[in-house]
Structure formats: structure tokens, C-alpha cells
Image (spheres, rainbow, N blue to C red):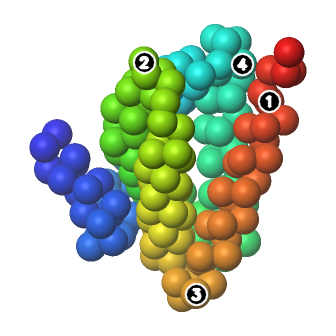
Amino acid sequence: MGQLLSLYLQIALLRAGPQRLPPSRLLLVLLLASHALFGYLLGALDEPAPYALVHAALMTLLMVSVTHALLLWCRHLERLAQTLSALAGTDLLLGLISLPIQLWSAAHGEPQVLKALLVLGLLVWSVVITAHILRHALDLAMVQTVPIALSYTLLSYMLAVAAMPPAG
């Protein structure tokens, strides 16, 4: 387990690619379930539970759908388990890093500027990690996968906004 965590950290630090992960379906299922559950728990800090549940499920489904489509398009579908495991695992790692920020913000409320800067930093890091994973999985250059990762992040954001509870 420690080796696996170390490998996810290496991927997040751009020192290893998803191909270093075992192509395990069990690992993939556990990571996708953990991704959805952790997304729900983080979301429940800021929004009502039903919306947090929908949001978490949508984000996990989007990650699976986009990754599947990209790998299918580049004819590397055999890399699906490792690529999704890398994306879900590194997303969980970033979620764990963001947890203290979310908890502190929920408890104190202010200053929102500091929270926004920290979240922006994590967002940029997330885009870079996603581009790094996709570079290996799709056999493309980083300059090609950064726009894909940015588009995926924008799509995730748009879907999250669409799933938010009505204001008021």
C-alpha cells in the first residue's frame, strides 16, 4: 500500500507515468468508488447532501467518459484501467491536500482570498497532472495534452455549476 501511495505521489510530481501502475480492475473499481465517495464528502462541506452526491457522481462519470473517449480516439483503449487509476488516484491525493483548506474555510469563513489562491494553485496543479497522465496514455506531446486537460477542467466546472442548487 505504501508503494502504491508513493507511486501516486510520483505521478503527481510528474516523475512517473500511469504505465507504472498495475492494470488492475479491482484497483480501478476501488479508486473510482473512493473518488466518488471523497467527492461527495468534500462537496457536502459546501452544498446540501443531495447536490453533493449528484456532483460527485457526475464528476466521476465525466472522468470515466472523457478518458474512455480519448483513449478510444487515440486507439489506446488497453490503457484505460491504468489511466483512470492514475487520474482518480491523483485526484484523491489533491483532494486530501485540499481537505484542510476546505475544513478551515468552512469553520472560519474568512479570508476567502487566501482560500481562492490555494484552490487556484491546486487547480493549476491538477491540470498539469492531468496533462502529464494524458501525455503518457495518449502518446502525445505535453503541448497537445495541456489544452485537452484545460478543456476537461472547464467541462467539469460547467457541469458542476449546472448541478448546483438554485440560489436563494
Q: Earlier in the sequence, mark 2 or mark 1?
A: 2
Residue 99 shows in the view:
no
Q: Which residue is mark 1?
A: 163
Mark 2 residue type: Ala
Closer to the N terminus: mark 3 or mark 4? 4
Return the x and y of residue 2 as percentages of the image width and height.
Answer: 13, 43
Check residue 52 in the rendering and tell me which mark sits there, or answer none: none
Name the residue at 69% across, 59% down: 152
Q: Amino acid at mark 1?
A: Ala
CB under 8 Å between callouts 3 and 1? Answer: no
Residue sitting at 86 percent across and 15 percent down?
A: 168
Q: CA distance from mark 3 to mark 4?
A: 35 Å
Element on which disc 1 rests: loop
The circle drawn on residue 143 is 3
| 111 relative to 90 in the view: left or right | right
Count of numbered labels shown in the rendering = 4
Which amino acid lies under the numbered mark 4 shown in the image of this protein?
A: Tyr
Q: CA distance from mark 1 to mark 4?
A: 7 Å
Give the mark toward the camera: 2 or 1.
2
Q: Earlier in the sequence, mark 1 or mark 4?
A: 4
Q: Crowdedness of circle 2 by 10 Å Cα count: few (<14), some, many (20+)?
A: few
Residue designated by label 4: 51
| Residue neighbourhood size for the residue with mark 3, other residues' Cα within 10 Å, grouped as few (<14), some (14–19), many (≥20) | few
Q: Amino acid at mark 3?
A: Val
Q: In front here: 1 or 80?
A: 1
The residue at which mark 2 appears reads as 107
Percent of width and height locating residue 57: 65, 29
Which residue is rendered at x = 43% and y = 22% of the image?
A: 108
Residue drawn at x 72%, y 65% as measured from the top left = 151
Q: Residues within 10 Å of mark 1 (few under 14, many from 20)?
A: some
